[in-house]
Image (spheres, rainbow, N blue to C red):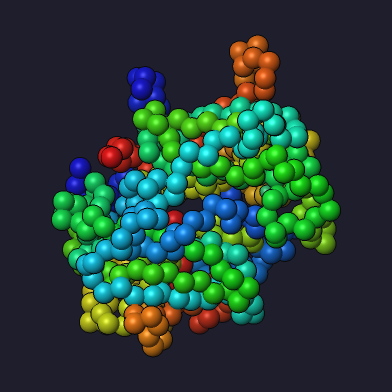
Amino acid sequence: MTTQDRMSRRMPTSEHTIGPFFPRSLFGAGDSDLTIVAPDASPTRRGEPILLRGRVTREGGVPCLNMILEAWQADADGRFDHPLDPARHMADPDFLGWGRAWTDEEGEFAFRTVMPGGYDDPVGRRAPHVNIAAMGAGLMRRVLTTVYFPDHAADHAADPVLALVPAARRARLVARPEGMADGLRVFRFDIRLRGTAEEETPFFDA
Amino acid sequence: MSAEDVPDRFDPWPPGVPPQVPVPGYPNTWTYTPSQPLIRRVPTRTEATGPIRLDRKLLCGEANLAERTPGRFAIGQLIHLSGRILDEDGRPVGGAVVELWQANAAGRYANPIDQRAAPLDPDFLGHGRVRTDEDGRYAFLTIKPGAYPVPVQDTWWRPPHLHFSVLGPSSLSRLVTQMYFRGDPLNALDRILNSIPDEAARERLIARDLPPAEVGDRWLGFTHDIVLRGRRATPHTP
Ligand SMILES: [Fe+3]
């Protein structure tokens, strides 16, 4: 690295739409499973495995086909295997916390993960949550939202990010229980990209 | 490095750099783009972190799109493209996953969603994925893609472009973008490129031609650096 590199402030490269043609060949088996760090790895044994499902729709409730969704979350104890986590040394080494899925003709997607843990952040205690980014044709920029779970209703009042969401729209960010599948609890989180203030999913600034 | 470093690491997008949405003349964007104001938040640990060693999950090493079978090249102008993934301080982002996909020389994607009547090329692999080295460097051998029309009522042609998806060390630095070629008359008409208000920001999406004499006689050479958001990007940790 030269001195020039170190000194010069660079402008970030602009975002562009992912478009309709993100190749299926870039998806591998297990990409939508956050509990494995590699395609041939064993799933983590910490925490409660769950399924997170949802449907992406646009204006008028029309399903969005071929939307790309990426999920990122803390492990079952609220830790990240990342240098910015002071408790990284205690993070679950068998949990990736990242996954990618796409939507079918009905706009449906599914992730397999574990119920995340909450953690103390300098700005307040974050309730257990999963961050979701959605990308697709028609979306020039990715949209960012956050999934909370009904199990932790008591923690939601203190969450510093949920507190920024207008009170009337907060319930849109809490997933709904949807029975069991393969012995796991299923949670549903539907994403409405565009609609009225009541319909539309709250999205965060990138 | 501590969690207290998190908020000041990520400045808001500079004005004029993100696309302005929805895009006039691109009808889809009017039914997909959220209508409510985006909610501003201070990045906490969960937004500032991201998966490290993602190359374990997303297998990397596919850098040659133009020669699937040794000695059999894809149809089109062969190009060698290399560049660096940097952060806003100009530091290299090592260990980033770089995904590339593009149309073939006829402007057709090898994707079942692309049903346009243009030929497919069995010798062209329309996608690749590599991991950047310690200097943040990536490289691909591919072909220059053809233009293709966007099937909207008031149609326009997309100029030749490459799609990039870059997964760096943070959710906030995640970037999906496109790269263009200098001097193409379709650039000025492209509603996607021109959704970026700032002229200098659009200019940064255009690859730099390398002097042919430096590159040799097998392909044309281009370089293209991509800058991810975030100052003092997390150093590569294996
Ligand atoms: Fe394209």
When the figure is inspected, residue B77 is found, relative to residue A16, above or below; the finding is above
Residue A152 image point, x, y percent? 25, 80
When the figure is inspected, residue B100 is found, relative to residue A158, above or below; the finding is above
Residue A126 image point, x, y percent? 25, 67
Q: Residue furthest bottom?
A: A179
Quadrant where the N terminus of chain A sits is top left
Question: How many numbered marks are there?
Answer: 0
Left of B151 or right of it: where is A198? left
Q: Residue furthest top?
A: B213
Q: Nearer the viewer, residue A25 or A52?
A: A25
In which quarter of the view is residue B86 placed? top left
When the figure is inspected, residue A53 is found, relative to residue A138, above or below; the finding is below
What residue is drawn where x is 68% and y is 55%?
B111
What residue is drawn where x is 34% and y is 60%?
A36
Residue A113 image point, x, y percent? 35, 68
Residue A25 showing in the rendered view: yes
Residue B135 image point, x, y percent? 39, 28
In which quarter of the view is residue B146 placed? top right
Q: Nearer the viewer, residue B38 or A41?
A: A41
Left of B152 or right of it: where is A172? left
What residue is drawn where x is 46% and y is 67%?
A203
Q: Residue furthest front?
A: B70
Residue A126 showing in the rendered view: no
What residue is drawn where x is 30% and y is 46%?
B8
Q: Nearer the viewer, residue B142 or A193?
A: B142
Quadrant where the C terminus of chain A sits is bottom left
When the figure is inspected, residue A33 is found, relative to residue B96, above or below; the finding is below
Left of A57 or right of it: where is B76? right
In which quarter of the view is residue B44 placed? bottom left
